[in-house]
Amino acid sequence: MTARPERKEEESGTYVCVDFEIGGEPLGPDPRNLVETIFLDNGANLIEHELPVLAAFDDPAKAVEAAIVCQWRVQREIDDPCRKLRIGVHSGSLSEAIAVLECSNGNQIIFSGAIDVATGGALDARPMGLATIWADSQPTQLWLSTDSRPDIDGRPLRIPT
């Protein structure tokens, strides 16, 4: 595992980070356009970044909903077993949001404890334990979305050590 990233002062927001877990040669079309369309339809601002898709939302509940709809639609409409979405959702800094993303495996949506607080505890997710995923901070509760069933990845989270 990689070392925990240092926390940096940067603009705070609610971010949804998307990456792909590639296993073999992707068989279906690239899902980026579908992901971006879903995010834009839910009020996101897309951010130019090295990640395949990065979006900022003003409304944390909209960010959660968009992430779930995105995962569900990509699994069902593109259905590429060689390219699985990894999604991290966090309210805070961008570097923290990317650290949350890095805890996910394919077909997993990971929410930080900050998202649970921002949505008033309304997540449809399973608590996965406390983890110190960025340096110089208290552990944060990570939540695994249960909305990806039955295609959810059962592997343990990628928690940095």
Image: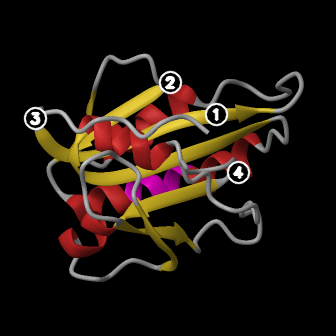
Image coords of residue 144 (percent x, y): 54, 68
Residue 114 lies, in percent from the top left, at: 25, 65
Q: Amino acid at mark 2?
A: Pro
Give the CA distance from mark 1 to mark 2.
8 Å
> Looking at the image, can residue 34 be seen?
yes
Residue of label 3:
11
Residue type at numbered disc 3: Glu
Query: Real-space Cα distance between discs 2 and 4?
Result: 17 Å
Mark toward the start of the polypeptide (3 vs 2): 3
Mark 2, residues whose alpha carbon is within 10 Å: few (<14), some, or many (≥20)?
Answer: some
In this rendering, which labeled residue sits more in front, label 3 or label 2?
3
Write the residue at 53% across / 69% down: 145
Q: Secondary structure at mark 2?
A: loop
**First of labels 4, 3 by sequence position:** 3
Residue 23 point in image, percent of width and height: 84, 32
Looking at marks 2 and 4 on the same chain, the residue that comes earlier in the sequence is marked by 2
Q: Nearer the viewer, mark 2 or mark 4?
A: 2
Magenta residues, start to end: 65-70
Q: Residue at x 41, y 51 (%)?
A: 133
- Up the image or down, 18 lies above or below 69; here it is above
Q: Judge depth for marks 4 and 3 and give the one in front.
A: 3
For residue 125: magenta?
no
